[in-house]
Image (cartoon, rainbow, N blue to C red):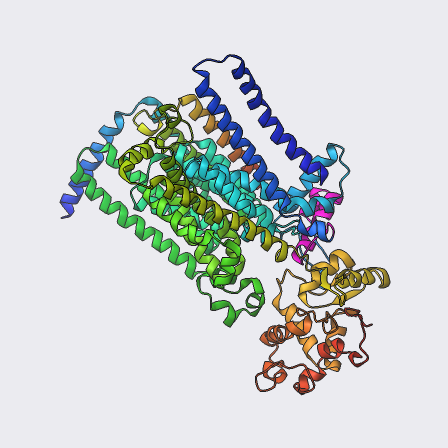
Amino acid sequence: MARSTGKDAQALFHSLRSAYAATPTTLKIIDLYMGFAVFTALIQVVYMAIVGSFPFNSFLSEVLSCVGTAILAVCLRIQVNKDNKEFKDLPPERAFADFVLCNLVLHLVIMNFLG
Amino acid sequence: MVGKTESQNGAVKATAAPAMNLESDLFSNFSFKSFKLKTKQQELLLRVSILGLVYILAFITRLFSVLRYESMIHEFDPYFNYRTTLFLTEKGFYEFWNWFDSESWYPLGRIIGGTLYPGLMVTAAFIYWTLRFLRFAVHIREVCVLTAPFFASNTTVVAYFFGKEIWDSGAGLVAAAFIAICPGYISRSVAGSYDNEGVAIFALLLTFYLFVKAVNTGSLAWALASAFGYFYMVSAWGGYVFIINLIPLYVLVLLITGRYSMRLYVAYNCMYVLGMLLAMQIRFVGFQHVQSGEHMAAMGVFFLMQVFYFLDWVKYMLSDTKLFQAFLRITVTSAIAVGALALGVGTASGYISPWTGRFYSLLDPTYAKDNIPIIASVSEHQPTAWSSFMFDFHILLFLFPAGLYFCFKKLSDATIFIVMYGLTSMYFAGVMVRLILVATPAVCLISAIAVSATIKNLTSLLRTKSKTAVAGSSKGTGGSKASSKASFDQSQPFQKNGAIALLLGAFYLLSKYATHCTWVTSEAYSSPSIVLAARGAHGNRVIFDDYREAYFWLRQNTPPDAKVMSWWDYGYQITAMGNRTVIVDNNTWNNTHIATVGRAMSSYEDEAYEIMRSLDVDYVLVVFGGVTGYSSDDINKFLWMVRIGGGVFPVIKEPDYLVNGDYRVDKGAAPKMLNCLMYKLSYYRFGELVTEYGKPPG
């Protein structure tokens, strides 16, 4: 049982890797950016666990900033991906412009909330 | 007030003018093609002028009390909003945001900057500053009085666009017309009712419209706009909890019914993260979005969506389904386990606070009556009777199920939303009278769908023998369907007569609705409740302005640092108009303080004097209606003072004031009742028929 699940996990891992290698480079860059954001959020949570969450608004603003940029990157990826039939009418420049606008609002609010 | 209607007329004229110019140009080159264009221009002109008329109608139907009495603020809560707006315009935003008020809740004081919803005040101040910039010398009081009708007009415009998004432009126009005069909305947005709901319903409908638009288009820009709409709603009213629970519920329903799409992901996530961040900028809300049980549904759905779409993406990447099933099982079980663990730990450790009493009593209506007498005592929080529904909705009440039927016939993401909004808001409207207001936009929209679809079907039956050019007009989005249906029904005789009869019946119903709404507005919802009118013995109109005269007496004849004790209903008015410090007011945030006042009012005079000495009270204000037959005075509310006081101080027992379970105030009343402070103050020298009331003794 354990060996079959181990083999399953390996097979899963391999097929995922091979499928992912086929994605276009632009999407991989966006994925890298998203990974960086999530990684930063994890570091901040670990730091909070060590030091304590006293200025809670600062902690919240930093975590939400990372989560927000990750979410917006995912939204950009969805809208730019040519495989998504729903968004084939949307020019990628418009998607990027929306992304920049939302990021601007996000970071302005974060700067106000950092305290 | 003149400036407002002028600017609205100017807006209507400006949009109608280009349409008129285009039409005259088309008249000049008269060709076969211009026949189709002319119809389109006509239709646009018709729509714009209807919307303009509805806009003006929504404004002027709310002006009854301004015409009958004068332009003043009504009721109790609006006086606090007026006072804070005055402070904002005089001292500026920074002082307002950091204001600590020592004039109310003496000796505790109140952190006003951190315990109010600033949206209404900031909006009114913004309108005031804009008008001042345009050199209209208005007083802030006029702006405050007319803010609610102005925003009601804006709500009709939003309702039009929302109806257009859900169904078509015809339904949008009908929805705008319905919501302009619906009594359920008028009751809280009449001129002078300067309260949060006047602005909040506009913000509610705007947020919902922008969110449905974002789900329909999948654009980040619309989701950002809906996040800003949500921010405006959070800044305006505590009822934003309804939005932050309805939208996740809607997303959940879409996920379950299999209507999930990438657009939903983009819309909800952008709106949730940005909306949550923006909402936390309001100090009164603070960190509730991550710490309160009422907001946890949104966060739960947020994490669920991440898991859901991640699984969807993995499924798309993998070609082997068996492998994916195994992965699916592992991920789902671990996600559920982690989620349940987090929720359990959070709730058990108290980090996630449970639902507060105000909202918990919506789910369990008996909770407030047993546990929190203050919430139970407010008359607006009682369950709704059928007569209230009929009074506030009239024909919309039976058009609502008809509209639900039409929505189910043509299910889409937008109609699912409006159905859910309608059903949940009707449930809450049944629990609490005050929430009929929240249900009103949904009922108007759904009924508009029913009316629009029915009338459209009937009129297309009337036009069966029309040319193809007319059938292709923009009025018939369902035109092609209806014409094929009409050709199918050609064989039925009297079909046209039946359609005409039904149309006449429909128009009769709609005209009765308009009459009823105007009558209700005029009779029931236009009283300022601070000025009363009655018919004298000779049929002349007698105005009772006693409240304001009493407050003005306080303002002129007492020292500036005098402290006034009264029941909490009048607190806001005393601080706003009398400009004196009060002990308790309508904010009711400190139950023990109110119970102390209640105990003082219901004790014997010597005990009450001790309590009042400890509170530094100089004056006592009591409202007594025995001379004029005014029925909502303090003697009528006295049992609530006893109950609230007795809730904290067991020395006050309610049965002491009753005779065999009956509440009597005549000679046969209970001895404790005859000797308590409230009774003594109210009936002081009543035997000599003193004609003034509300005068504070020393």
Q: Is residue A66 magenta?
A: no
Q: Quadrant of residue B219?
A: top left
- Vertical side of B614 occupied by B95: above or below: above
* Residue A63 seen in this snapshot: no
Query: Which region of the structure is painted magenta?
Result: B70-98
Picture residue at 47% right of the left edge, 52% below the top:
B395
Image spot of residue B369 (x, y percent): 51, 70
- Vertical side of B599 occupied by A104: above or below: above
Picture residue at 72% right of the left edge, 75% below the top:
B611
Image spot of residue B297 (x, y percent): 41, 51
Observer-nearest residue: B400 or B682? Answer: B400
Task: Judge from the rendering whether residue B21 lies leftward or rightward of residue B226; answer left or right.
Answer: right
* Residue B388 seen in this snapshot: yes
Observer-nearest residue: A75 or B397? Answer: B397
Observer-nearest residue: B540 or B277? Answer: B540
- Vertical side of B391 occupied by B565: above or below: below
Image spot of residue B417 (x, y percent): 40, 44
Image spot of residue B410 (x, y percent): 33, 41
Task: Label the magenta part by its dominant secondary structure.
Answer: helix
